[in-house]
Each structure stands twice: as C-alpha cells, then as structure tokens.
Image: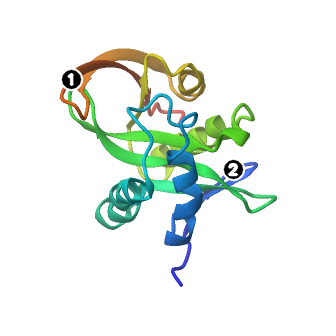
Amino acid sequence: MTAMREILRSDRLVLREITVADLPALERIFGDPLCMRHYPSVKDGAATRDFFERLAFGSYEKNGFGLWAMIDRRSGDLLGDCGITLQETSSRTEPEIGYHLWRDHWGKGYATEAATACRDHAFSVMGLSRIVSIVSLENLPSQKVAERVHQRREIFSKQNAAGETVERYLYISEKTSGT
C-alpha cells in the first residue's frame, strides 16, 4: 500500500497526496455533468486516471507538488481535490491553484479554505512569489472562490484543447513582505 503523504492542514481539511484508492471518488466528480459543467466535457474513468497521472502522480515526481486529495478532518471523507499544478498563462508557465469538489460539498467554504491554504503553503513552504488561478468567464462559483483567495484579476486568451482561442480570468496573488 502506498503511504499517503500529508501536505497541509486547515481548520476543517487535510490535503494529502492522492492515491490510486482515491480514483473512484474522483472519477465520480469528473464523470458528473453538473460538476463538470464549466469544462468541455465529462471524463470517463480512463480520462480521469490520465488527468491525475499527469497532475498528481507525475507532478509529485517531477515537481514535488500537484493536485492533492481534500479530506474532511472530522469524517475522513474525500471531498474532492485541490492543489498546485503548472499551467500555461498568457506570458509563461505558472503555478496554479485548482480545485474540484463533489457537488454535495459546494457552498460550504471548502474550496476557499483549501485554496487559501494552498496559496499560503506556496508562499511560506514552497517559497513561491506568485501563484494564480485560471477560471472560465462563465464559472461564477469558482470566480467567487478565486476572488476570496487572490489579490487581483486579469483577462487573458488561451487555446483550448480544440485549438480555439478562449478568454479566461487569471486571478493572481503575489507574495508581499507580510505574507
């Protein structure tokens, strides 16, 4: 059995490395049309495993960070994922805070709590000076989370998987002398 390495704790959550045993719960999120309504499509089990192979398992090995399992400290339940991955922005590859949550847990502040903990971890433990979140213009719930976590917002254009140019919000936090 793979050891689950805890990354950080917040008031209600533990963020730890994702294991293969977590994939069925994550596949439920990525296969759900409501959870994935702001993405091009839902993902089947194989596509979800590929996603986490790149942005969790492979990223841990290559970068020392990635998407982490979001665990309720009280119940031990996996609520979703949140973590730091490398994403292309308008100017360069940047560390980005991303999150996905099962819909029963929406509106309870978990995404904001986890993303804020990731931002603080990026500055205090990882030594980063800038971290971002990329959010689609239609994804109002994630915009609200990002507005609570980050300092400012810009708009940038990027190419999606189909090769089309799309606009996204880029929420930005930069380390100041007080953080």
Residue 17 makes an appearance in the image: no
Question: Outermost residue toward the bottom?
Answer: 1
Mark 1–mark 2 Cα distance, whole angstroms, equals: 38 Å
Question: Outermost residue toward the left?
Answer: 163
Estimate the x, y position of residue 148 in percent, counting from the top left: 60, 25
- Binning the other alpha carbons within 10 Å of mark 1 as few (below 14), some (14 to 19) or many (20 upward) gives few
- Which residue is painted at 53% across and 22% down in the image? 143
> Could you tell me which quadrant the N terminus lies in?
bottom right
- Which residue is painted at 35% across and 58% down in the image? 50
Give left or right: position of 129 versus 143.
left
Q: Label 1: state its secondary structure.
A: loop
Going by the numbered disc 2, the residue's amino acid type is Ser
Residue 10 circle label: 2
- Which residue is painted at 54% across and 55% down in the image? 26
Estimate the x, y position of residue 5 in percent, counting from the top left: 54, 70
> According to the image, label 1 marks what residue?
164
Mark 2 or mark 1, which is nearer the start of the sequence? Answer: 2
